[in-house]
Image (cartoon, rainbow, N blue to C red):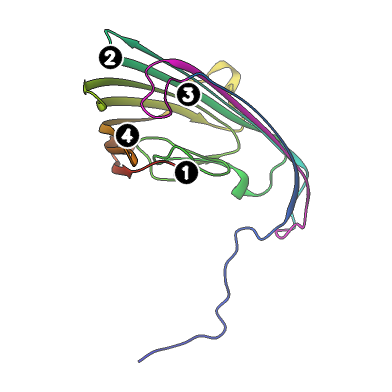
Amino acid sequence: EEIVDDNLEKIYFDKSNYFNLFGKATFDSYDTNYFPKKGFYFNTDYIVYLVSSNFNGNFSSFSQLYGRIGIAQTFLSKLTLHLISEAGITIGDNGNEVHDYHLGGNNENFINTFVPFYGYDVADLNETAFLRTELTVRYELFKNNFLSFTGNFGRLNDDLWNNGNIFEDTASGYAVGYGLKSFIGPIEVKYSWTPDNKSDYWYFNVGFWF
């Protein structure tokens, strides 16, 4: 028996149209896009949400500033330390959670305000502002084959500085992985976990990130 309810309606989290201003600055001296051994990376984005068709009825103009820096350095020809720090803040009253920062998962090219965070599933952590630091220790077993260990730590709160207690309520996650460079791009498998709630995940990637 099949029951069809013609009265079902689609659920929209946001159906608004926006008019924005956007600025971006990037500097990249990494020696390679994947598994870098040396170099420095800097990126900052600034977006202003000026006008909205206001589907949810609670829009007011606000802006978001995001920045990311990274540095990689190799020692003894095979051991690489790769440090990444990033942060995002919301300036003004963002009444729509769609525009919050969403942390979790493993991805190099997340869209909008999604940010990777090992140990958590995609968008498990959400807030209007965040700080995140990631340190990866990577060892090249033989040419283009790498073992890695990563720890990342972050804080999500609309008041990041928290009266100086920036390490309070810190989220953490870890990952171990194996990766290799191939003609179709990086091939990786990683196991991640977090001591915060005992969750664990497997991540698989085959090919270039787009």
SS for tag 4? loop
Quadrant location of the N terminus in the rendered image? bottom left
Q: Which residues are magenta?
A: 30-56
The residue labelled by disc 1 is 210
Residue 194 colored in magenta in the image: no
Instruction: State the residue in front, 36 or 58.
Output: 36
SS for tag 1? loop
- Kindly identify the amino acid type of the residue bearing the numbered disc 2: Leu
- Kindly identify the amino acid type of the residue bearing the numbered disc 4: Thr
Q: Which one is in front in this view, the residue at disc 2 or the one at disc 4?
A: 2
Is 98 displayed left or right of 105 in the figure? Answer: right
Give the image location of residue 144, x and y in percent: 26, 27
Query: In the image as oriented, which residue stretches furthest toward the left?
Result: 141
State if disc 3 and disc 4 touch (CB < 8 Å): no
Q: Which mark is residue 194?
A: 4
Mark 2 or mark 4: name the one nearer the start of the chain. Answer: 2
Q: Which mark is residue 168?
A: 3
Query: In the image as oriented, which residue stretches furthest toward the bottom?
Result: 1
Q: CA distance from mark 2 to mark 4?
A: 25 Å
SS for tag 3? loop
Mark 1, Cα crowd under 10 Å, few <14 / some 14-19 / many 20+, is few
Q: Which one is in front in this view, the residue at disc 2 or the one at disc 1?
A: 1
Q: CA distance from mark 4 to mark 3?
A: 17 Å
Mark 1 or mark 3: name the one nearer the start of the chain. Answer: 3
Residue drawn at x 27%, y 33% as measured from the top left: 179
Mark 2 or mark 1: name the one nearer the start of the chain. Answer: 2
Give the image location of residue 32, x and y in percent: 42, 25
Residue 45 colored in magenta in the image: yes
Numbered label tally: 4
Residue drawn at x 55%, y 86% as measured from the top left: 6
Mark 3 or mark 2: name the one nearer the start of the chain. Answer: 2
